[in-house]
Image: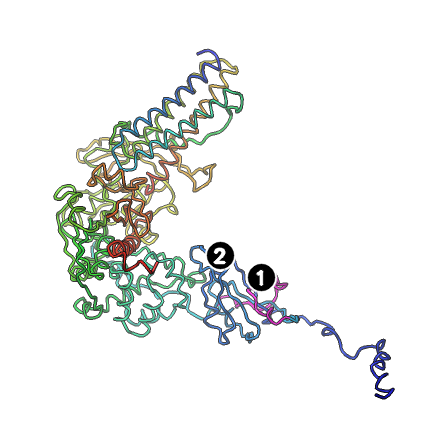
Amino acid sequence: MSLKDLLSPFYVWQRAFEKPYTSIKPIQERPGSAAYRGFHINLSEECIGCGTCHKICQNDAIDMVRVEAYEGRSGDSGLRPRFDYGRCCWCALCVDMCPASSLRMSNEYTWITSDPTEYHFTAGVEHTSWQENPLGYRRAEGYHLYPTRRIDMEMRPPEDSVHSFDEVVLGYSEEQALLEADRCIECGICVATCPAHMDVPDYIRSIRDRDYEKGLQLMYRTNPFPATCGRICTRRCESVCPVGIQGEPIAIRWLKRFIVDQVAPEDYTRILADQTGDSGYRVAIIGAGPGGLSAAYYLRRKGHAVTVFESQAMAGGMLRYGVPSYRLPDEALNKDINYIQSLGVEIRFNTRVGREIQFSELLDVHDAVFISTGLSLPSSMRIQGEDHPRVLSGLQVLDDVASGRDPGIGGQVAVIGGGNVAMDAARVSRRLGAEVTILYRRRIADMPADAEEIHESQEEGCRIVTQAIPVEVLNAAQPGQVSLQWGEAEMVQDPKGGRPRPVLQEDRMHTDTFDCIISAIGQGGDLGFIPGNLQEQLAIEWGKFIPGEYQHSALAKVFVGGDVANRTADAISAIEDGHHAARGIDRFLNPETYSNSG
Amino acid sequence: MNTVDEILDYAIDQEQQAADFYAELANRAEKAGMKEILLDFAAEEQSHKDRLLAVKAGERELAPEQEVLDLKISDYLVEVDASEGISYQDALIVAMKRERAAFELYTDMAAQVPASHLKEVLQGLAKEEAKHKLFFESEYDERVLMDN
């Protein structure tokens, strides 16, 4: 080795104190323009995890990841977008598409790190310097990649509908349905919210594909009452639809109805191709309402023999005797029920358990029993004079009309209550020619009835008097009439929280005279058919069953569901209860089949 | 009853009687789920008694000046029987009316007593009963008057 070779490493030191030719960082950071498409910002509290950004990203640069803090929130998947900046091309399609408007971009664009894995980050969850940046790209006000207004539904005008029991909602044409179906962004948030977990995005896609048979098959997987729910569902799905955040939610209920209306009932057997074997087990169902018949349908598909005990002359429960035909025509309800019956479900009409047959007999001769008797007893106001002959119950009026009887309401009617039964009793009374006043103790915003029902009742001429508390029923001067003393209420904040409570103002009392008063303040379950010794063994709270896993009661053979066992008391929840109970009964009857499946 | 202790003893005895009343009714209750509810009522009355015992022992003070919301629900409801077939709605009516009667009793007694510590105790007891009435009326408003 030469001397030069030995000294050469030391030559570099002669430049150690010279000015470097390179810079550690770009000399001066130039800020991006005010609308620059830089690093992503996500307002995680406003994000609902719909995944639309993930779906629209052309570079697969967005994954949806679980974030514990957002799990379990209604209308929220609990997922949040995670960006891969090795793939992102900054096109901003994700921002333009975001239905919650939670996604935006900052004008920051430099990020220097020696760890390449850092370029994956969950915006709005992991700390970044740009999350609070007020500059950067935002979707322009009013600009959307999809139509935000829903396709209007054609309805009978109120001046016509008030004289008729014909259906008010006329349904979409195919052209309208296709346009409405096109608005769906297929996020699936609705699936989790629907009590029956119906596959909404897929059956809406079947409309776009004009494959209505496929749509019907998809719906029957979780709901054997699609014609009914296509008309009167409480549609919680629509309340969480992300499209509704910036506009109007997809008309999921009307699209469901459209699919069912395209399929003739005589084609159901071929299209659905349900197999019903014979397991050798016998199941009794008490109540032929949506809960009972949903259980019957899914139990028959498992091969179990099903007998339904129904106190009325026809099946449907509250759907037939409590929902007027202008909202749910008999043909639609019968379409659902006839198909269920066609699978070999036996229904014993005019058979009230506890009267024509005893509950203990059902237990003795069946392998399982499902109770879904609904809420059939009208609640009492418990005010003075309530037993006046001109005080009628809302349920009785609706039952009379559904059964073709004249409820004898007269020309001036007061309806007390703010639920759907009250609205239906009022609208039925209008159709029978009465002038109707609805008295409700709270505000319109507090009414438990569907907003749509409240709106339509007003359009049809029902007068709603809010913050009105009935205090006494009195004899009227004219025979055949009745007077109601009621007082105005002030809404007062409860110091313990919760919604404001109405407080009667005793210096503002009124007395009005009517031909009848229809009381529709709520209803309860009738559990009198269950012997006392068995009632003690069933978990019952506030007059309702408390079901266990798979709707199982505390009695080995007994399962419970529907309005008499849930808090929501709507058709779709009863349908899901029935489906769930059918799974539970099948597990109970065939434990060995499930022993390894958890 | 002329002394504060005598009044408090009376009030404590009334709460015990109320607790016994609901416990006995629970034993006879026929309707599903009512036994548990009536036992809850009995426990509520027992907690009222415990609060008054704490007042008597000097561990807690009554609040005669406290404003208590009056929903006036029970004022216009009919009397109902506390029978073995009692429903939840009727059980709440019985409870509301008992609390209202106690409230009126202490209010009337306070009106007849000249300004004194005894008067303040009676007014404080009336406010206690008003709070109990509000508790049951709020339950009635939430659970029975849901659609109204």
**Prevailing SS of the magenta stretch:** loop
Q: Quadrant of the N terminus of chain A?
A: bottom right
Instruction: Label 2, secondary structure: give it.
Output: helix
Residue A132 drawn in magenta: yes
Residue identified by numbered label 2: A70
With A86 as the anchor, is B121 left or right in this view? Answer: left
Does the image show residue A16? yes
- Mark 2 or mark 1, which is nearer the start of the sequence? 2
Quadrant of the drawing holding the C terminus of chain A: bottom left
Q: Is residue A113 left or right of residue A95?
A: right
- Which amino acid does the dot numbered 1 rest on? Glu
Chain of the residue displaying label 1: A
Which image quadrant for residue A39? bottom right
On the image, the x and y values in percent for residue B51 come to 47, 26
Residue range of the region highlighted in magenta in the rendering: A115-142
Number of residues whose C-alpha sits closer than 10 Å to that of mark 2, classed few (under 14), some (14–19) or many (20 or more)? some
Give residue A279's position: percent from left, percent from top.
Answer: 19, 60
- Of the residues shown, which amino acid type is indicated by label 2? Tyr
Q: Residue at x 63, y 63 (%)?
A: A129
Residue A504 is drawn in which quadrant?
top left
Q: From what the image shows, is residue A339 above or below residue B109?
A: below
Foreground residue, A205 or A465? Answer: A205
Name the residue rendered at 60%, 62% in the picture.
A131
The image's mark for residue A126 is 1
